[in-house]
Amino acid sequence: MKTNSIKEKFLLYKVRYQHDATAYGLLYDLYVAKIFRFILYKVSSVEDAEDITAEVFLKSWQYIKTTDKKISNFNALLYRVARNAVIDYYRQKKRQDLPLTDEDQYHNIVDSRDVEKDIDIKLEVKNIEQALDQIKDEYREVVILRYVEGLSVNEIASIIKKSKSNVRVLLHRAIKRIQEILGE
Amino acid sequence: MDKIIKQLKDLKGVKPREDWTKANRDVLLAQISSQGSARKSSFFDGWNLIRMMVPISFINFLAKPIGIVTVAVLFVFGSGAFTVNASKSSIPGDILYPVKLTSEKVQVGLTVSEDRKAELHVDFAEERVSEIEQIAANETDPVKRREQISVATDNFKKNMDNIQETLEKVKTVKAEKDVVNRSIEVVKQVDLKVEAIASRLDNNNDLKGDLAVVKNIDAAQAEIEETQAKAVEVIVDKYDKGEAELSSEEMLETVEAQIKKVGDRITEVAEREKSVVDTSGQAEVDKVAPTDSEKTVETTDVTVKTEVAGSESAQRLLDEASSLLNQGDLINALEKLRESSAIAREYKDIIDSKIEELIPVDESNLEAARVNTSAPVVPAVLPEDNSVDTDDAIEL
């Protein structure tokens, strides 16, 4: 078992059975960047991504404290909560009749956050982000989870509630589509 | 492709602002602290800690000596042995059913060989099917019947998952040729037995009257398909690496058989599709058909007659798999086959939900429509609302 996993389980135990806020703070440190990134590529606005990320951690705390169900994978739990929070965000946005995407804002993301300083990498990041922006959300979601966050097909299947073969097909189609967009 | 994956990995550099991360942490901790103070330790905390920290593999490791001691105790106290024995005929809902499942777990825990484990998991899966058959034939209360079949199919799916995991281990383990050859024989047997299980479920008319039961059985059949695909994957992999003594004819036969299975499934899906099309018109189906085209899905409000339907898309991939197989490219043939199978399954789900929409009231008609796909289903009232699932509705 990985050291990280042991540490995570111990922290989760402290949160669940002792309602230990400090332990939850450490879990936050472990996952905040991942969850922020996952949300950012779904909402395309840094401010909204920050708000939703904050909400995800608060909701997850409340869930862990109250649920009777076994939590075997804290990682998967956070992604599921994040996914639902993004759905709620779009529902709300739709009700307020606001535009769903703000392209200008999206294209400013790369410049406004702490990305790699190297120019080449920055350009590559921008290219791949633009390609990601053009593919369907379900493709973008699996690609981010698999290749950026390094989750297994099994974990992704449990997060997006699809079968493993569905996930494999989505990944295959997503990469094919990105290749088309990038002209490779 | 590798370049794209590398570029995607570079996105890990995208991080939230440091000042926001810190400020949000402080706010979060203040919020959760205000919701109540920390709990004091209790007597059960130790046990809870063990449950959370101890990995399953370690529990399995411990299960062996515990299992031996249990067996010894059962011999000494005959009534215990009687309990385990009596539990063998139990079905979901019986008091002894958990004993039966636990004794199966102990049996697997006591087994070292992965081949033997795979065989055991298949035996247990067969047992689950017997339970399903028994419930379907004897339980008259429809609510209880659904619940019990749901429990049995859930356990069946776990058995199938276990078989797939064991097959994956067989695939990755490197061993002497004769050991691998023996494993391959076991994998073939697993494939055959699982095929027999699929037919048992398919041919049981007791399982065809109730929509909830049909859905459960469909989910079980999907797991069976995954297991069979895994078995073929293991055989092809071992052949491809030269680890097993298999003739090329034998390999061709194995993959061809799998192609035929997927082909049969596509035909079945196409027939179901036809029954819906006959009923509600081609346009309705076209709207929901999954295709390779991005535009198709994004313009669901427009009827696109030129779209490739799901079953055709799956058939096309299957043809590509056949042609790759003829060229001797086993690995890519298998990849296409897997993709084709997943599309067929995905499309079948869509067609089934379409059938459900068309017959919202009388569930028994649905099964009639499924069994006799040549007879078009005529709905009493066509639903006006064509809304899709929330997840699909939001294009983020």
Image (cartoon, coloured by chain):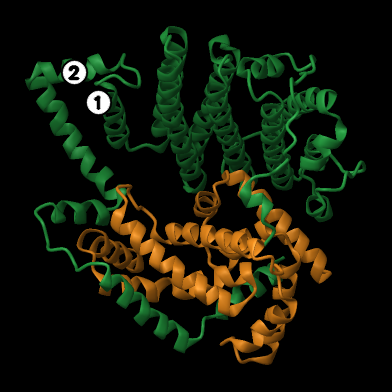
Residue B373 visible in the snapshot: yes
Identify the chain drawn in orange. Answer: A
Answer yes or no: is residue A121 visible.
Answer: no
| Residue depicted at x 63% and y 17% | B362
- Taking the view exactly as shown, the residue that stands out farthest to the right is B306
Question: Tags 1 and 2 in contact by the CB under 8 Å rule?
Answer: yes
Q: Which chain is green?
A: B
User: Residue B301: where, in percent of width, then height?
Assistant: 82, 48
In the rendered image, residue A11, in percent from the top left (x then y), is placed at: 28, 66
Is the residue B137 above or below the residue B329 in the image?
above
The kind of residue on which mark 1 rests is Val
Q: Nearer the viewer, residue B11 or B287?
A: B287
Number of marks in the rendered image: 2
- The quadrant of the rendering that contains the N terminus of chain B is bottom right
Q: Is residue B91 left or right of residue B281?
A: left
Q: Is residue B372 above or below residue B386?
A: above
Which chain contains the residue that carries disc 2?
B
Q: Is residue B350 left or right of residue B281?
A: left
Q: Is residue B296 left or right of residue B237?
A: right
How would you rate the neighbour count of disc 1 (Cα within 10 Å): few for under 14, some for 14-19, many for 20 or more? some
